[in-house]
Amino acid sequence: AQKVTQTQTSISVVEKTTVTMDCVYETRDSSYFLFWYKQTASGEIVFLIRQDSYKKENATVGHYSLNFQKPKSSIGLIITATQIEDSAVYFCAMREGLSSGSWQLIFGSGTQLTVMP
Amino acid sequence: EAAVTQSPRNKVTVTGGNVTLSCRQTNSHNYMYWYRQDTGHGLRLIHYSYGAGNLQIGDVPDGYKATRTTQEDFFLLLELASPSQTSLYFCASSGQNQAPLFGEGTRLSVL
């Protein structure tokens, strides 16, 4: 079965610095899709950024970017110039194809990020 | 604006009770999902659907039924609720190659 692992339970940083959150995955698929979401204190789950495995360039959206290392099955999330409001739980997820022909998202366990003044 | 709306936002019921959680999406998405989120387990897929009338079993389906009555509406049914089903429930929708969008969540307590 496919699997997504986030080993960092929590990270604390000072605002305006850069933080990297790790994620490794296991898959048998030759083509796959990876996503990062954040869950705010209110519980809302927000999509941030995605990486399609066939793309060699790392995705970037605003102050979020990805460090995609395909040989290591790794997809790190980098947040630059962190802000207090970036404090949240960050989830890595991978799209898994299913026998029905559809697909689902497999989630990691999440990393709690705290940004301090 | 793309949206996934869940109702109710909070629900309290008793063991053995009957509960229906509702989800409506206005994104014209084919795929809809029900997840539960528990401390220590992250997000786990209960049921999903890729169109009206279609239902598929997820990873933790026991004790749950689902119905997809239209492309917009996806319901999760707990016919004999148990305390182990106390959780935070999320509905999500997506297109074929899009990142799923999540609803605001429903907090369910089974006493």
Image: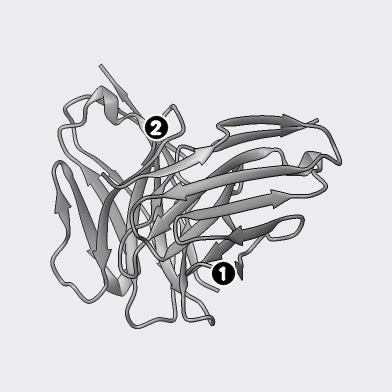
Picture residue at 56% right of the left edge, 52% below the top: B35
Q: Nearer the viewer, residue B30 or A1?
A: B30
Question: Up-down: is B101 above or below A3?
Answer: above
Q: Nearer the viewer, residue A104 or A21?
A: A104
Label 2 crowd (10 A; few <14 / some 14-19 / many >=20)? some
Picture residue at 79% right of the left edge, 44% below the top: B81
Task: Name which residue type carries label 2.
Answer: Thr
User: Left or right: A12 with respect to B15?
Assistant: left
- State the SS at label 2: loop
Looking at the image, do the residues carrying marks 1 and 2 touch, with CB atoms under 8 Å apart? no
- Indicate the quadrant containing the N terminus of chain B: top left, top right, bottom left or bottom right: top left
Res B39 seen here: no
- Tell me residue A29's x, y (percent): 40, 81
Q: Residue furthest right?
A: B16
- Indicate the quadrant containing the C terminus of chain B: top left, top right, bottom left or bottom right: top right
Q: Chain of mark 1?
A: B
- Tell me residue B25's x, y (percent): 41, 50
Nearest to the eye among marks 1 and 2: give it.
1
Question: Up-down: is B78 above or below A105?
Answer: above
Gap between marks 1 and 2 measured at Cα: 33 Å
Task: Name which residue type carries label 1.
Answer: Gly
Q: Which mark is residue B83?
A: none
Question: Up-down: is A29 above or below A6?
Answer: below
Q: Chain of mark 2?
A: A
- Tell me residue A56's x, y (percent): 15, 72
User: Left or right: A57 with respect to A73?
Assistant: left
Residue B110: image quadrant is top right
Q: Which residue is mark 1?
A: B53
Picture residue at 13% right of the left edge, 66% below the top: A57
User: Left or right: A77 with respect to A90?
Assistant: left
| Colour scheme | one colour
Q: Which residue is mark 2?
A: A40
